[in-house]
Image (cartoon, rainbow, N blue to C red):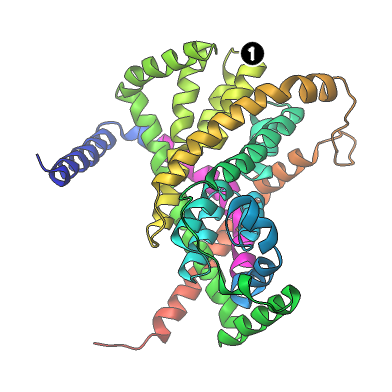
Amino acid sequence: MNVQIMKTILLAASVTTVALSIIMHPEHTLEASSSGLSMWWTIVFPSLLPFFIISELLIAIGVVRFIGILLEPLMRPLFRVPGSGAFVFAMGIASGFPAGAKYTAHLRKNNDISAVEGERLVSFTNCSNPLFIFAAVAVGFFHNPALGIILAAAHYAGNILVGFAMRFHHPDDRHYTQLVRSSEPRLHQAFRSLHETRLSDDRPFGKMMGDAVHSSIKTLLMVGGFIILFSVLNELISVVGVATLLTGAVRTLLLFLQLPTVLDVPLLSGLFEITLGSQLTSESSAGLLPQAIITSFILAFNGFSVQAQVASILADTDIRFKPFFMARLMHGAFAGILTLVLWKPIYIDMLSSGKVVLPVYHRDDSETLAEVLYQFFQLTGPWMTFFSLIAFIILAIRRTRSEPDLR
């Protein structure tokens, strides 16, 4: 049978099955949707929006090209990507999923990178932000701020190792930008490119800012949709009994890796959605080290929810999704191994012994900074999201009225 026909039948059957499951289990669907919406409304949207807006402005003004030219000698030999990849990596760490994919796609649309360079770049720049690792996972789920040090170290070091490994992706690729071969001093190149980029964009700054807000909120609305969808899917696979079949394979893998089999359901949930998977892992009866290893893998794998977000963003470019997926498996393995390697020298010998004192927010109850930030978003996040959506609606109405009527 034709492959495309098989694909059509598979997609139609899958979507129909999900639709019927939603109809048959409305109470579970509502509960899962509310949980996903709450996380997006409270934490994801308000924490990502400022980074997205500022990044859009930095790209439009030309600061990213300025940084790219200056850091070309670092990024090109290490990762075989342009210097602008350093900006993508930094913003990917600062703002979290799916910022790395968003900025990589933006660079590709501007023809600042090739498709192969985009595949290398997105593979190690789409990572979890420190707020989620320290506040939500270490403090919120495990109630152990020190664990955040291990999880963050394994996560970001694993990302760098993935970048090193992905430099061998398409070894025959010899794409270099014209600026790299120029004899002009690099700082002069950077300033000239910054100035030319700003002049080439004739939008007033107010219009530029409005476009940045509009584009950022559209991306975050898409992210919210995927979070809610995969929260529902994660709940449905448990309700309809599919999870029982899948946990058998997961349990076999855990036995092979000599990890407690009680982590089968948390790991399976984490493959779909990292927040639920991390929470279930923290609630399991396994020891702290196995919990940390599985959590590191879940954070690195990103979950199918984040991967679907990335696939949606990359779909507008010629950057393929398959290398990104393979990199996620690689990152998961690196992060799990690094957690095991760093456990004794950092967590046992340094953090648990008190040789390293975690920074605290100076209050009587000695709350950690991660706890303060988490509480801040819990209190103010919904209001930030609400007013941002109101601003988005106003911008959308103005755009609609300003467009000419072609009827």
Residue 362 left/right relative to 388:
right
Q: Residue at x 90, y 26 (%)?
A: 355
Q: Which residues are magenta?
A: 31-56
Residue 207 left/right relative to 240:
right
Q: Residue at x 16, y 46 (%)?
A: 4
In which quarter of the view is residue 164 placed? Answer: top right
- On the image, the x and y values in percent for residue 130 come to 68, 43
Compared to residue 342, the image places residue 377 above or below, namely below
Q: Dot 1: what SS?
A: loop
Q: Residue at x 51, y 54 (%)?
A: 101
Main secondary structure of the magenta stretch: helix
- On the image, the x and y values in percent for residue 332 come to 54, 32
Q: Residues within 10 Å of mark 1 (few under 14, many from 20)?
A: few
Compared to residue 245, the image places residue 45 above or below, namely below
- Give the camera-side residue of 69 and 4: 69
Amino acid at the residue labelled 1: Gly
In which quarter of the view is residue 346 placed? Answer: top right
- On the image, the x and y values in percent for residue 175 come to 50, 63
Q: Which residue is mark 1?
A: 287
- Say whether residue 371 is visible: yes
